Image (spheres, rainbow, N blue to C red):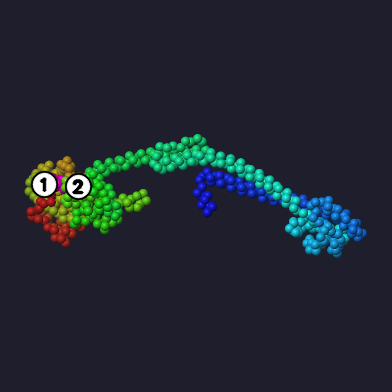
């Protein structure tokens, strides 16, 4: 209960309460220390004084005791007691413990004799007794080392206690005065110290209500002053951050507003929370009509993409893109769209919702159709140009008529066996159809010569890959056609031409062309050699597998001939160019 009360006090009262409590505790500690010290000091003095009195009485009583003058002894102790106000009693015992004289008016109390006894009466002894509610210091001193008897004196402790009590009252008065003066001083000090804190609290409350224009007036350079400066700097930083946040929010809102794509922010339970203008235009709704609407309702009924299960799947996938679906407009019209979605997380990683960005596919489909038509036109034109170049080459050498088409067919079969993509196969086939394009610059008499070529003539023949490369490199193909053309007479051991490339530096397509060109050239008649059998052609590439020709290409070529029954057509196809 007390703890709760203290916790509910304001800072100023806590300081005041704590200071007063500290003064009280210190005062009580001083009071206890003084009381204990003074009491012990006074008791020690009384003890010493009592012993001196008892010794003096023992000395004066020696002769009357020896002479058994009890009346004289009685008279002596009566006079001595009356002369000392703090002496409560005096009595004298002989060596056998008989009372010789005493100062008790109502008779000697029997129990007192043994209240301060000692086994050896030759030694003095002091003991505190309580007699009739009074604290008495009982002092026993032997006479002639106890052979004659003992003298007992009782000294009252009440004067000591009264003295201590008076001192305590004085100290209490001083403490009370100090407490009052200290309380006033502490209150003033606490007020001076806490006023800046209250100003700081007031400023913090003002800032908490959103008013960041208020500043703390700093009057000191102590810790509280530093705290005030820090608060002012913090508020300035907060105001700057808030302004930047407002600007950033406006910036983001403008981005969302002016986005060409439709944007939907959907809660994790499937309801639309935010849309932009493009989303409203796409579906024909007002913004207020879409907010709070189930995301399921904007999808065409047969698609039903936004069902609870699908929504959870989207959350699990975190991000999906380019999903083609159909939205349903306010008028009930189905709108083909492509959309992407991304899960939105807060700073702690918890899922806040899903962001959908959608775009109508109406214009895109029209554009794709137009682009597809253009590509077909270009492809057709390219096919015609390539075919024209191929025919131009073959008309210069009747023995090679159809050679390039047949090489293209074999190269396509090998590439498929090796798992090349359709895209790469198209590029390979296109190069194969014109791989001897450079022979346009070779004299016809060399091309059609039936006898062995001279060294100079062979060197002229070896220029055709470079010549074909120079023509093809000026044309922008989606494939490295010119490089394939340049490398189709290279060999993997570096013995080929025109650059003597090693296998690691050759395109895979060029390696396929090299094998296809050799096989086709062997199995068909040339001006300089008769036609060889397919078996002989395959033996040639097998013998040079890993030496001149790529092993994987040779294996694929053997596979399509031996196991898949590939055969050259008499009239090679022109499709696929």
Q: Secondary structure at mark 1?
A: helix
Main secondary-structure element of the magenta-colored stretch:
helix
Crowding near pointer 1: few (<14 within 10 Å), some, many (20+)?
few
Residue in the image at 14% along x and 54% along y: 410
511 on left or right of 145: left
**Residue drawn at (79%, 63%) of the image:** 111
For residue 556, side relative to residue 47 (left or right): left
- Magenta span covers which residues? 365-381
Residue that numbered label 1 is attached to: 380
Q: Alpha-carbon distance for marks 2 and 1? A: 43 Å
Residue placed under numbered mark 2 in the picture: 284
* Residue 526 is covered by the magenta coloring: no
Nearest to the eye among marks 2 and 1: give it.
2
Let me know if residue 211 appears in the view: yes
Sequence-earlier tag: 2 or 1: 2
Q: Residue at x 27, y 55 (%)?
A: 311
- Crowding at mark 2 (Cα within 10 Å: few <14, some 14-19, many 20+): some
Q: Which x, y percent locates residue 350?
A: 35, 52
């Amino acid at each position: 209960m007390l703890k709760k009360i203290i916790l509910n006090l304001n800072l100023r009262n806590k300081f005041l309460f704590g200071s007063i409590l500290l003064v009280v505790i210190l005062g009580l500690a001083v009071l206890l220390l003084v009381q204990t010290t003074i009491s012990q000091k006074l008791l020690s003095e009384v003890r010493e004084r009592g012993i001196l009195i008892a010794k003096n009485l023992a000395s004066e009583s020696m002769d009357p005791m020896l002479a058994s003058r009890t009346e004289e002894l009685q008279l002596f102790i009566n006079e001595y007691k009356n002369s000392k106000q703090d002496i409560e009693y005096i009595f004298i015992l002989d060596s056998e413990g008989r009372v010789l004289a005493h100062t008790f008016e109502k008779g000697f109390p029997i129990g007192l004799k043994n209240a301060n006894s000692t086994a050896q009466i030759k030694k003095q002894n002091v003991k505190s007794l309580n007699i009739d509610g009074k604290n008495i210091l009982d002092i026993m001193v032997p006479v002639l080392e106890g052979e004659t008897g003992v003298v007992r004196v009782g000294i009252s402790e009440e004067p000591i206690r009264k003295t201590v009590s008076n001192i305590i009252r004085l100290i209490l008065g001083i403490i009370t005065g100090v407490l009052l003066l200290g309380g006033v001083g502490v209150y003033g000090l606490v007020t001076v110290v806490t006023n800046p804190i209250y100003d700081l609290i007031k400023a913090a409350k003002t800032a908490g209500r959103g008013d960041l224009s208020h500043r703390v007036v700093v009057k000191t350079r102590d810790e509280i002053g530093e705290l005030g400066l820090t608060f002012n700097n913090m508020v300035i930083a907060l105001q700057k951050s808030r302004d930047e946040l407002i600007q950033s929010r406006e910036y983001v809102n403008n981005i969302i507003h002016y986005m060409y794509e439709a944007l939907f922010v959907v809660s994790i339970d499937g309801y639309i929370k935010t849309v932009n203008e493009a989303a409203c235009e796409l579906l024909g709704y007002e913004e207020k009509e879409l907010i709070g609407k189930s995301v399921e309702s904007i999808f065409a009924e047969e698609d039903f993409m936004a069902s609870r299960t699908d929504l959870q799947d989207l959350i699990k996938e975190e991000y999906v893109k380019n999903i083609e679906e159909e939205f349903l407009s306010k008028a009930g019209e189905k709108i083909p769209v492509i959309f992407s979605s991304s899960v939105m997380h807060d700073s702690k990683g918890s899922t806040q919702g899903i962001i959908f960005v959608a775009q109508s596919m109406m214009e895109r489909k029209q554009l794709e159709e137009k682009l597809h038509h253009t590509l077909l036109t270009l492809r057709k034109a390219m096919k015609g140009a390539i075919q024209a170049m191929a025919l131009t080459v073959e008309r210069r050498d009747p023995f090679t008529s159809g050679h390039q088409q047949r090489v293209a067919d074999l190269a396509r079969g090998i590439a498929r066996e090796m798992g090349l993509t359709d895209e790469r196969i198209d590029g390979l086939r296109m190069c194969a159809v014109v791989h001897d394009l450079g022979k346009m610059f070779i004299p016809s008499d060399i091309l059609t010569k039936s006898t062995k070529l001279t060294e100079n003539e062979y060197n002229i023949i070896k220029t055709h890959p470079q010549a074909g490369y120079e023509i093809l490199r000026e044309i922008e193909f989606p494939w490295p056609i010119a490089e394939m053309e340049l490398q189709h007479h290279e060999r993997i051991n570096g013995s080929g031409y025109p650059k003597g490339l090693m296998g690691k530096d050759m395109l895979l397509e060029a390696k396929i062309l090299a094998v296809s060109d050799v096989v086709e050239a062997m199995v068909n008649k040339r001006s300089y050699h008769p036609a060889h059998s397919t078996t002989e052609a395959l033996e040639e590439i097998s013998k040079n597998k890993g030496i001149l020709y790529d092993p994987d290409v040779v294996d694929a070529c053997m596979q399509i001939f031996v196991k898949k029954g590939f055969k050259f057509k008499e009239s090679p196809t022109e499709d696929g160019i």
